[in-house]
Image: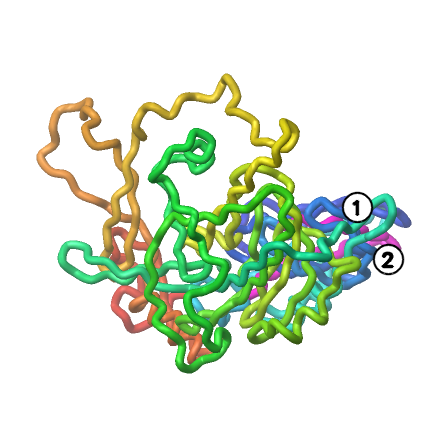
Amino acid sequence: MITMFVSCVAEPAYSLVVDYGKTYLLRIVNAVMNSELFFAISEHNLTVVGTDGTYTKPLVTNYLMITPGQTMDVLITTNQTPSYYYMAIRQFVTIDPSIPDFTNMTATAILQYRGNYTPPASPSLPTTLPTFYQLDAGYNFTSKLRSLASPEHPANVPQNVTTRMFITASINLVSYTFEGIIVNHIASTLNNISFMDPSSSILDAYYRHISGVYTTDFPDDPPSFFDFTGEDDLPSAITKPATKVKVLNYNETLEIVFQGTNLLLSAEDHPVHLHGFTFFVVGMGFGNFDPVADPKGYNLVDPPEQNTVRVPKNGWVAIRLRVDNPGVWLWHCHLDRHFTWGMATVFIVKDGGTPETSLLPPPDYMPPCTTPSPIRLEDFNDADGVVNTIILPAEGTTYPYPKPDAEEVIVLASWFEGDVNLLVQEALLQNSTSSTPVSDAYTINGQPGDFAACSNGTSTYN
Ligand SMILES: [Cu+2]
């Protein structure tokens, strides 16, 4: 039993016990909330044969890059000297690694051959695992994926497109007044719209023709075209939240080009995930999408079919799909922090005119949505200006105990050595992993307390 790197973990590393000379199919999922990952196994090749439930042409590689929410089917052959080998994951950081949430830990498990041998005191790490900020490694892997496109597993790539959308994915700010002070809260957007959670279900509102829950004016283009991936003359990043959806007719063929932006100098990957469909990834590139030149390079023969795809940092990705699944479908960035900041929207796909192509009615066992929510959400800004949301009983809920003398909000959160938004920009501008300008600790109402060295502002807390 071997545990390395994480001395605080009581459990030993996971072991996958294998026999020599066999082929194993690994179904790998990235369930991390906020990070893309590299994955490799020491001394063993990986053969990718599927992504997101669709089989691919075999891709032999010595590492994977897998985005949050993505699954990969991978073959390994146990053809090495029986021993212990590390399988390892490492965070693929596409924003500058010196930002606060960068975790430079390599997590490991063990590929353990059955047999009589003396295991090594310390298995070797896979030498092929890319380093944290190796942008080309992410691109090189992703760009090699091809769908199987065989008679049994055809790739029905739409050759003609009826609807085109060009969608920017950005980090923005929402500005509002809280207790008389103007607060900037990080937001994220698609086409400069930060998705606001609706007051009730969009599916229910659509099905029952209830107005006032959403509007149908999600735009096909961003409000302005600028040098999306540049560093100068970036437009204001201030945005407004709204619940806007895009309505599509049944069986339309849709092309979306997602364009990453560098607003707030915070360009990074956005793993975009669509519910209800898989799509073909027909093109991908760096810089600003060129609507004349880039489509000439599209793969319309055997592009990979996925439900999650990364919009590369300071780059673009083009997808095509046929919308033949009527209903209400969320799509969003699969980095949870971006999703919760509003990098999301909804497709409503209309019925196709027959019972088989129409949205089903709600099932009999569906609970009615007639009672108000038993909870309410309220925002509080803590000592360093970061806004936190706390959950309270709904307004008017009877307090079941004797009335207390006072009521206080206690926000347990994390702490940074300054304004988080500025720190992110500062870290990016410094472009350095060695001079991390951030210290952080956990806090109660914004303060880390007497025992945290960082609380006096003189030392860095890692
Ligand atoms: Cu994102």
Magenta segment's dominant SS is strand
Furthest toward the right, the residue is 21
Q: Which residue is mark 2?
A: 80
* Residue appearing at x 56%, y 74% in the figure: 288
- Span highlighted in magenta in the image: 70-93
- State whether residue 234 is above or below residue 379: below
Furthest toward the left, the residue is 405
Give how far across and how far down residue 15 sits, in percent.
Answer: 71, 46
Q: Secondary structure at mark 1?
A: strand
Neighbourhood count class around disc 1 (C-alpha, 10 Å): few under 14, some 14–19, many 20 upward:
some
Give how far across and how far down residue 51 sits, in percent.
Answer: 71, 50
Answer whether labels 2 and 1 touch (C-beta < 8 Å).
no
Q: Which quadrant of the structure image shows residue 397?
A: top left
Q: Which quadrant of the structure image shows residue 448?
A: bottom left
* Residue appearing at x 38%, y 66% in the figure: 461
Furthest toward the front, the residue is 353
Reply yes or no: does residue 71 show up in magenta. Answer: yes
